[in-house]
Image: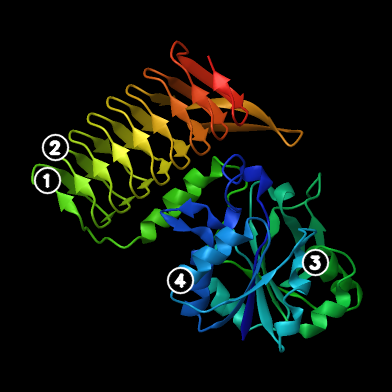
Amino acid sequence: MQAVILAAGEGTRLRPLTRSRPKALTPVANTPIIEYVIKALQKSGIRDIIVVVGYRKEHVIRYLNMLDVQVRVVVQEKQLGTAHALRYAEPFLEDRFLLLSGDNYIDPRSIQQMIKEKNAVLVTDHPSPSNFGVVVVRDGYVSEIREKPADAHGFIVSTGVYSLDRSFFKHIVGNEIPDALQAMLNAGEEIKAIQAVDWQDAIYPWDLLQMNARLLKNIDGTRAGTISRSSKLYGLIHIGKGTIIGPNTYIQGPVSIGNDCHIGPNCCIMPNTSIGSRVTIDPLTYLGNSLIMDDVVIGSHSRILDAVIGEACTLRDHTTTWSHESIFELEKQFMKATFGAVLGDRVSSAPFTILKNCIIGNNVSIEEGNTTVSGVVADNSVVI
């Protein structure tokens, strides 16, 4: 059986993190999301994999070339929709195939269930169904699919994982997969609804915290690098090669730390925290429930909780994130969210900065004298 992974989209709702990377390459538990999808396919016995790329395609192609798996890459030059993207893979499809999204986590057991079915959609319950394709299920079969309805009449949503064959292409009438599926139903064909075992998606950047916490439970507990004898490590912890854990540092898993990091001394890292590679955490800093990407520097005496920190950020000493509930306006929609901070890439902050339930864009500089930052700060801003 073949598989098609759609990895051409930008993931605009995940900005600012997707300004410099496609959503499929966003690291969660120190692994890009698309790699979880590829590994799940491999564990299910599927080796013939086609990846459709588009936005920041060079980044995706470069990463796929680093993996120990062969995939065929096709390019969607203009990102017009999921069905439009699938069209680029059509010449390479023989008969049956799985269609998956490269920016959602999927587990092997769900894939193995889908392989058994000819025409099927993987579904799950979600508290925010209007962000997805809402599925009406009767007696185990799909009776209707509505893409991101303003007023959803149920909580069952499509995960974007489908089992199809080449006959599906005759039903494509627009640029989106749900429209083609509805055309199948209108033509009298049956589509089975399969309940997902484990499926994770991050709609907005703060959703990465929940996804990160979930996937950290499955990490490899290898501890490499140099760990001080006076440090205390408990639970499931991964420490990469070349990383140094300084004296009297306390780590409570699940925690993943990448390669060539320098942590401590006298730091405290609490559960559900992932730290990328080449990260420096200065002494007497407290971290918890956070996703820290590569090449970040966090100064001494800082307290970082419930935060997503993009690549190459520099947070100077005594930086604090303050988890608070606020209402944000994103893409002309108002939503309530509780988290500490989301920082894009290359953000720098002066000492004694407080980041209170804020979304900071890429290349933002927070100057001295500003003690508290909240709300949304645009890319390339200088906060004074």
Mark closest to the chain's N terminus, 4 or 3: 4
Frontmost residue, 200 versus 346: 346
Q: Quadrant of residue 179?
A: bottom right
Residue of label 4: 67
- Sequence-wise first label, 1 or 2: 1
Circle 3 packing at 10 Å, graded few (<14), some (14-19), many (20+), is some
Q: Quick check: marks 1 and 3 in contact, CB under 8 Å?
A: no
Please state which of the two labelled residues, at mark 2 or mark 3, is closer to the viewer. 3
Outermost residue toward the top?
369
Question: Quarter holding the N terminus?
Answer: bottom right
26 and 117: which one is in front? 26
Q: What is the distance, in whole Å, between disc 1 and disc 3 at their CAs?
A: 54 Å
Q: Is residue 161 left or right of residue 189?
A: left
Label 2: few (<14), some (14–19) or many (≥20) C-alpha neighbours in 10 Å: some
Residue that badge 2 annotates: 248
Q: Is residue 197 left or right of residue 219?
A: right
**Amino acid type, mark 2:** Asn
C-alpha separation, residue under disc 4 versus residue under disc 2:
36 Å
- Say which of marks 1 and 4 sits in front: 4
Residue of label 3: 84
